[in-house]
Amino acid sequence: MHPNGAPSVVEVAGLPASDLASLESVQGSATWQDAAWQAILSVAVGPGQPAVIGRYSVVDGSLRFTPQFPLDPGRTYAVRFDPSRLPASSGRSDAWRTQVLTTDVAMPSGATPVSTQVRRVSPTGDVWPANLLRVYVEFSSPMSTRGGAEHIHILDEQGKEVVEPFLPLDYDFWNSDRTRFTAFLDPGRQKSGLVPRNELGPSLEPGRRYTLAVDASWHDTYGQPLKEAFRREFRTVAPDLTPIDMATWKVRLPKAGTTEPVQVEFGESLDRQLLLRSLAIRVPSGQIFPGHAHAEQDERGWSFEPEDPWPAGRYELVALSILEDLAGNQIGRPFEVDTFTKVEDPEPTTASRPIVIR
């Protein structure tokens, strides 16, 4: 964003009315896709680099490109405009249409005061299994499109950095508004018997104290560093090798006719983000009962508040198969015999447990 609050855009002005009309006619067309727009106007982080993703439109007599994520202040972008690729250029011999125009643009750095900070790290508890699989870092404002894995560290009791505990990947693991980053501990070092573990040892050892450190040099979407560095101490316990068992969960049920919550205690901490996506209350017809879910007690519990009072009757507490504990164990399936997969499961299955509200 600019200081005045307007979105950062790149515009080409002065185009003939016939070209603007042609561009307007193909807006939203299924046959006129991103590659066609990028052939006309592209914005990239450098010459020869992939084009920045965004939306093209004709606004106020100009061809406008609005990036999907705000341009990074202080970074220079390469802009390329090829008028020969305009829809109205076919068969035209105008000399100006043969000239590809290039320029560099940049947002000024320091446009906003430093204010972004780490809002939460999960697991939120201070006791983690030694075979922890994921750490989520949540921010108070959107972060830069640049990678972030190099800004997260794990330090031992002496302040020495643990060598390469995380997978060296960061481009796929942001949420949609870039306020939550997922850092994966290397599963090759978390599972027993694999080469990385045999060569480097486990990333975390049980019975130790560690500090998760987030550098202040991590930039937000305005190109500013974080307001302050973040530190979070935790201790490790034995690796968790046991699958999730819904039958062991303690469920507290509300009375019919009230809007009191259903409360569930797991007996262990579960993965916060998967928990919020994976549990629901289902009615006999198969529909999900409307309401609001919350993670509780360092992700050791879950509560569900209905939008309307509970009718008396039978329900199901239903869980998607993507639900995992902190070590990646799923319902009825331990992580040790599984393979590493991305969080997104295209066709998750379900498990359920019947409940009755009276």
Image (spheres, grey):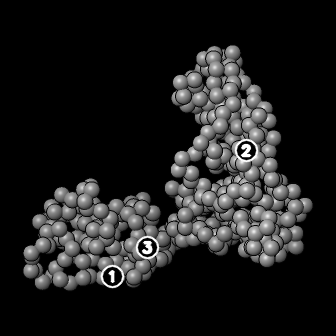
Q: Amino acid at mark 3?
A: Met
Q: Secondary structure at mark 1?
A: strand
Q: Amino acid at mark 2?
A: Gly
The residue shown at (44%, 69%) is 71
Q: Is residue 208 above or below residue 255?
A: below
Picture quadrant where residue 227 is located? bottom right
Q: Nearer the viewer, residue 187 or 208?
A: 187
Classed neighbour count for the residue bearing mark 3: other residues with Cα under 10 Å, few (<14), some (14–19), many (≥20): some
Classed neighbour count for the residue bearing mark 2: other residues with Cα under 10 Å, few (<14), some (14–19), many (≥20): few
Q: Pinpoint residue 307: horizontal percent, then vertical percent.
A: 57, 27
Question: Comparing marks 3 and 1, which lies closer to the viewer?
Answer: 1
Measure how far apart labels 3 and 1 are at the Cα level: 14 Å
Q: Pinpoint residue 256: horizontal percent, then vertical percent.
A: 66, 16
Measure how far apart labels 3 and 2 are at the Cα level: 51 Å
Q: Is residue 133 above or below residue 291?
A: below
Q: Which residue is mark 1?
A: 103
The residue shown at (39%, 72%) is 51
Q: Tell me if label 1 and label 2 are in contact, CB under 8 Å.
A: no
Q: Pinpoint residue 225: horizontal percent, then vertical percent.
A: 60, 70
Q: Secondary structure at mark 2?
A: loop
Relative horizontal placement of residue 228, taking residue 44 as reference (left or right): right
Q: Which residue is mark 2?
A: 332
Q: Which quarter of the rendering shows the C terminus?
A: top right
Q: Which residue is mark 3?
A: 107
Q: Nearer the viewer, residue 287 or 36?
A: 287
Q: Which quarter of the rendering shows the N terminus?
A: bottom left
